[in-house]
Image: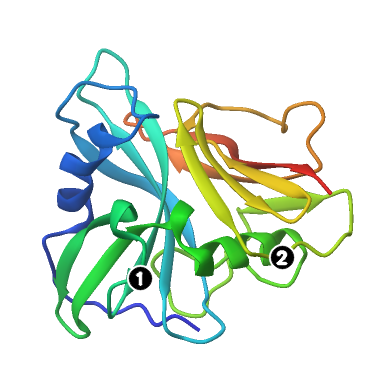
Amino acid sequence: MAVIHRTTLSPTKLELLTPWLPTRPWYAGPTHPVLSRSGGFRLDDPQGEVGMELMVATDTSGAEPVAYFVPLTYRGAPLDGAEDALVGTTEHGVLGKRWVYDGGHDPVLAEQLFALLAGRAEPQAQSETDTPDPTITYSRTIPNVLSGPFTAADDEAGTDIAAKGATLHLNRVLRPADAPPEGATGHIAGPWRTPEDTEARGVFAVLRGA
């Protein structure tokens, strides 16, 4: 169970994301985003070592706001071989130095996303300890067990996390949608707040394959 600490973080998550987002192939805005946290949820690491926050961050720097799905992992030490996925480091008021990674490239988060689709994990509220988040919905039509090793790749459409026999696509640029696309064998969906403080809802991730 992840414990949510009411403490300081320097630099903040949004301060880390501001220079990092424009380096991603799926970033759709100007070169200097103006970000606000507008939604998301958490997943628990069964080993209790890695923090996992699946954030929605909205950029209002362009002509129209753009909501991004930005899963992040927080670690107490560097992740070997993941230098390209490092968002940055930050100083946590309770836990000390934390290495912040693009969660789409972290095997612990990949494992828990597939566990969520299999019904073996439960989405947790973004800012509350030990509190399930019922607004996050997920489904899967094929009951095969999905497992690693996981590989991840980014392109202009988002991030693909490949497992044995299936690929989970993370929709990095979010758009309101009522249902996953045709041919999907599973999906994860949830809400976020718009700059006008209304609720939007869309598909965060789409599973294809077994």
Amino acid type of the residue tagged 2 in the rendering: Ser
- Which of the two labelled residues, at mark 1 and mark 2, occupies the earlier sequence position? 1
Q: Secondary structure at mark 1?
A: loop
Q: Residues within 10 Å of mark 1 (few under 14, many from 20)?
A: few
Distance between the alpha carbons at the discs numbered 1 and 2 = 20 Å
Query: In terms of image quadrants, where is residue 54?
Result: bottom left
Q: Residue at x 23, y 73 (%)?
A: 98
Residue 114 at what x, y percent from top left?
A: 68, 60
Residue 110 at what x, y percent from top left?
A: 57, 61
Q: Residue at x 52, y 70 (%)?
A: 108
Marks 1,2: beta carbons within 8 A? no
Residue 96 at what x, y percent from top left?
A: 16, 82
Q: Which disc is residue 206 wearing?
A: none
Residue underneath mark 1: 80
Q: Residue 138 vs residue 66: left or right?
A: right
Q: Is residue 172 visible?
A: no
Q: Is residue 206 above or below residue 161?
A: above
Q: Secondary structure at mark 2?
A: loop
Query: In terms of image quadrants, where is residue 194?
Result: top left
Q: Which of the two discs, 1 and 2, sits closer to the camera?
A: 1
Q: Residue at x 18, y 33 (%)?
A: 34
Relative depth, front residue between 91 and 87: 87
Q: Is residue 113 visible?
A: yes
Residue underneath mark 2: 147
Q: Residue at x 69, y 30 (%)?
A: 178
Amino acid type of the residue tagged 1 in the rendering: Asp
Query: In terms of image quadrants, where is residue 87?
Result: bottom left
Q: Is residue 40 above or below residue 207?
A: below
Report the colour scheme: rainbow
Q: Is residue 15 above or below residue 158?
A: below
